[in-house]
Amino acid sequence: MAKPKKYYVLYKPAGYLSQFSPEHGKKCLSDLVDVPKDVYPVGRLDEMSEGMLLLTNDKNVNQQLLDPTNKHERSYLVQVEGQLNKKAVKQLKEGVEITLPDGQYTTKPAKAQKTGNPKLPDREPPVSFDKSKGVSWLKLVLTEGKNRQVRRMTAAVGFPTVRLVRTGIENLDLGPLNPGELQKLDRPTFYDKLNLH
């Protein structure tokens, strides 16, 4: 008999791996939440990145969301070191060349805009940056998810990322969730918000 499909949204805090099995003594998802054994994360967030991580045992979700031809939008709030300028924002919108493990890559056009300080929970551990340069915030919406893409993109335009929070995928957002909190959703809501079929 087929196991019932389960759907969750997790606010992954900084300092956790996007997997359930521990590795090199680092904290992982099983230190945070208790879900059925057949539930896995869809995609990943770097250890020090925060925000939305989807958990499910529905393989169809994985296939659709991770297929770049579907162009699912992923939204991020990015704190960068330095005072972000219009030139850098324009470059991010148009696409920048980044170095991936398998070579050079030019990112696809993205939505990018400088923004004021967002209302976010404090990060543990707090971010560190060069106080003389200060920081600024950027809203970034991508339709692809290459390895450490956001960090590579902001570094390529001269503004290293110091804090990265994935706030949503398509029309699904973190809502009132705090770091470490998990929300269970039903299939119709999950599929509808993520524009899955």
Image (tube, helix red, strand yellow):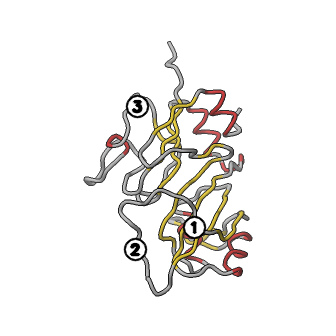
Q: What residue type is labelled 2?
A: Ser
Query: For this view, does 37 lie left or right of residue 10?
Result: left
Q: Which of marks 3 and 1 is nearer the N terminus?
A: 3
Task: Identify whether 195 is placed above or below 150.
Answer: above
Residue 55, position in %: x, y? 50, 38
Nearest the eye: 120 or 128:
120
Secondary element at image label 3: loop
Nearest the eye: 131 or 53:
131
- Label 1 Cα crowd, 10 Å radius (few <14 / some 14-19 / many 20+): few
Secondary element at image label 2: loop
Residue 3, position in %: x, y? 49, 19
Tell me the tag on residue 45.
Answer: none
Q: Which amino acid does label 1 sit on?
A: Asn
Callout in the foreground (3, 2): 2
The part of the image, by quadrant, that contains residue 97 is bottom right
- Residue beneath disc 3: 35
What residue is at 71 percent from the left and 50 percent from the top?
71
Q: Which amino acid does label 3 sit on?
A: Val
Q: Earlier in the sequence, mark 2 or mark 1?
A: 1
- Residue beneath disc 1: 117
Q: Residue furthest top?
A: 1
The part of the image, by quadrant, that contains residue 115 is bottom right
